[in-house]
Image: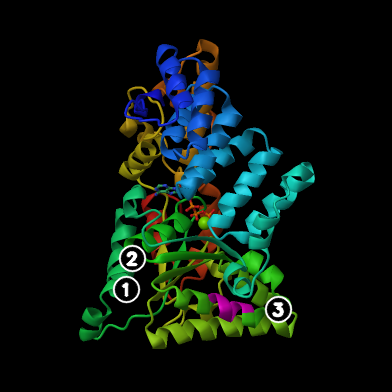
Amino acid sequence: MGAGYTAPMQDRPTDPTLKLLLEALALAPDNAPLRMHVATAMEKAAQPRDALSHFERLLGDRALGDDAGLGAARCALSLGELDRALGFVNAVLTSVPEHAMGLLLRARVHERRNEHRDARRDYERAVQLDPELADTKLWDALLPSREEPDGAVGKEAETGPREGVTFADVGGLDDVKERIRMRIVLPFQKPDLFAAFGKKGGGGMLFYGPPGCGKTFLARATAGECGAHFVSVGLHEVLDMWIGNSERQLHAIFEDARRRAPTVLFFDEVDALGMQRAKLVTGAMRGVITQFLAELDGFASRNEKVLVLGATNTPWDVDSAFRRPGRFSQVLFVPPPDRPGRAQILKLKLAEKPQGPMDFLRLAEVTEGWSGADLENLIDAAAESAIGKSLASGKVEPITMPMLEAARARLRPSTREWFGTIRNHVQFANESGQYDEAADYMRRHNLM
Ligand SMILES: Nc1ncnc2c1ncn2[C@@H]1O[C@H](COP(=O)(O)OP(=O)(O)OP(=O)(O)O)[C@@H](O)[C@H]1O
Ligand SMILES: [Mg+2]
């Protein structure tokens, strides 16, 4: 961590106390409490960028962890770097889940990210733990407003066109990315060109595949490629809330997406609707599904700058009505990463961490069948060893190949089970060829 740190020599502190503190720190750079002092003083002096670099240095040195983590999160928040802020505060809450200040801070971060439901949950817990933390202004901002019920229902995350990930952050999956680019991104960006060749826009794409292989991540990256807002709707959550006035809420989510266009509207766990339909008991649920399909059809005909994507682990639970033209008419298999893909994912995920010499191809060779999420776990496990070693030695120890190999021997890949489940569907329920891509993958990998 210390490597990426640039000493804020250029600071021109106007505050004389701060100037003194900085001079002292230059003489004793390893004095963690002093650096904490400096960081806090800078934060107070409205220099969040410099303060953040000191907090990060403390984190890198594993000194004053929680306080440094919260300081870093506060600074990132005030800089508007919301993903980073969330990362910092989550790290604190992972080590101390009931950290009241941490929860309050995370509530603020969620509020800024328009994730009001998460914000309310964190805020309520924080105040339960420490009533002194009550902040009526924040709470008012979190109360469902006139506009919010539509926006907030079941919505997980939302990013502006400039933030967020793109295909460059997705390791491997070159074919998948190319297909999305041709079938989705380009028609979205150049509808007129496609229309000239008789290709209609509209119609969403449904991603399916084993867990942890990047369906959700790809949807977010697709929004990044399109330069569009990303709105993610977790259908399981939404459906719970919807017994009652559901259609209106669903319509509001679509309307909201239209208003913010260009938007990628992403429905995670689309199978939730299919399953509910199979178990259909109430007329109310039928109404929701009808409404959902009508909204999709509306998009197809109006050709608006809203792209609808969906993802599922269990495509066989998704009702065939969803796959008609103009709805989720395109189905795309998102496979586990291949060897070069795994090497790239490992490289991407290790990029920000202290590391020794790496042989990514060798690691990729011994992780056949590992998902992106599995590879992330592998790195986490190795990072824990490095942290343990650092604590023992008192300096930052990098992640090494032997640490990764040891972690690999302990962990198991998670995609096999899924292929076990889909096998029957591929063999006996693939009349329309919807699982051809999965079948092809399974044949090539001796999974059938
Ligand atoms: N190809 C990839 N490149 C980079 N990161 C990846 C890739 N695949 C997965 N990941 C990482 O793994 C995490 C989990 O992936 P993601 O949530 O997108 O999987 P998923 O297919 O949606 O899984 P699920 O079916 O469980 O919802 C992501 O947050 C991402 O960091
Ligand atoms: Mg997912």
Disc on res. 280: 3
Q: Amino acid at mark 3?
A: Leu
Instruction: Answer above or below: position of 404 versus 232.
Output: above
Counting from the top left corner in percent of width and height, residue 158 is at 49, 61
Report the front residue among 9 and 174.
9
| Quadrant including the N terminus | top left
Q: Quadrant of residue 440?
A: bottom left
Say which element carries label 2: helix
Q: How is the image coloured?
A: rainbow
Say which element carries label 3: loop
Residue at 33% in and 80% down: 201
Q: Is residue 422 visible?
A: yes
Closer to the N terminus: mark 2 or mark 3?
2
| Residue 262 sits inside the magenta stretch | no
Q: Which residues are magenta?
A: 249-253
Crowding at mark 2 (Cα within 10 Å: few <14, some 14-19, many 20+): many
* Label 2 sits on residue: 226
Disc on res. 188: 1
Q: Is residue 371 visible?
A: no
Instruction: Answer above or below: position of 360 versus 339.
Output: above
Name the side, left or right, on which 42 lies relative to 276: left
Closer to the N terminus: mark 3 or mark 1?
1
